[in-house]
Amino acid sequence: MKKISLLVISACLFSTLNLSANETYTMNFDKETRGLMRKLPVYKDPAWVCKIVTKDSKEFFFTSPKSLMEFYYNPEKRPSTKVSSSEEIKDIIVTDYKTLKPIDAKYAFYVYGSHKISFAGDDLPAFENINDAKKFLEMNNGRRVLNFNELSKGLIQLLNGDI
């Protein structure tokens, strides 16, 4: 009986997670859209574009996953956004580096240590598919594939040269 209950609970949890991962996202930016952190136009390198949507539907664009995570870990450093904590964030969206498709950042895979850099310097190219991330890692001298939960404030500080 315990095995069946556990199986049912696991199946329900998995299906809920899958629905979240399959949501369709958009990146509706133009030539005037600038990244929040570095104020650079995001259209110039669409493979790196990211976006945060707050619970009150404000959208903030970023020139890379690293820039997005800088804001995510310290939103209070940008008081003009009126976002004081990550609890106010509804969606975190990154662009799949290979397909240029907007994807849920929480389900993406990030390559650390490759020689590909964004406008922000050393960065974390994002991929929807772990096999694409591994292939990119091998082809671009990456060091490791990370999931969203493995990204940390310390890693972002390291990438920025703050440590």
Image: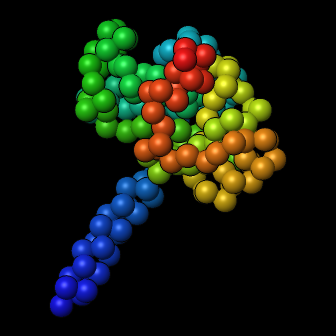
- Which residue corresponds to the image point at 42% horizontal and 22% vertical from the top-left? 71
- Total numbered badges shown on the rendered structure: 0
- Which residue corresponds to the image point at 57% horizontal and 52% vertical from the top-left? 128
Camera-side residue: 27 or 12?
12
Locate residue 52, reporting x and y percent: 42, 31
Image quarter in which the N terminus is found: bottom left
Camera-side residue: 64 or 45?
64
Locate residue 146, reporting x and y percent: 55, 46
- Which residue corresponds to the image point at 78% horizontal and 41% vertical from the top-left? 141
Locate residue 69, reporting x and y percent: 47, 28
Query: Which quadrant of the figure has residue 21?
Result: bottom left
Q: Is residue 81 above or below residue 108?
A: above
Camera-side residue: 64 or 149?
149
Image quarter in which the C terminus is found: top right
The answer, for residue 101, to whether it is visible in the render is no
In the rendered structure, the answer to whether residue 131 lies left or right of residue 128 reads right
- Which residue corresponds to the image point at 59% horizontal and 18% vertical from the top-left? 160
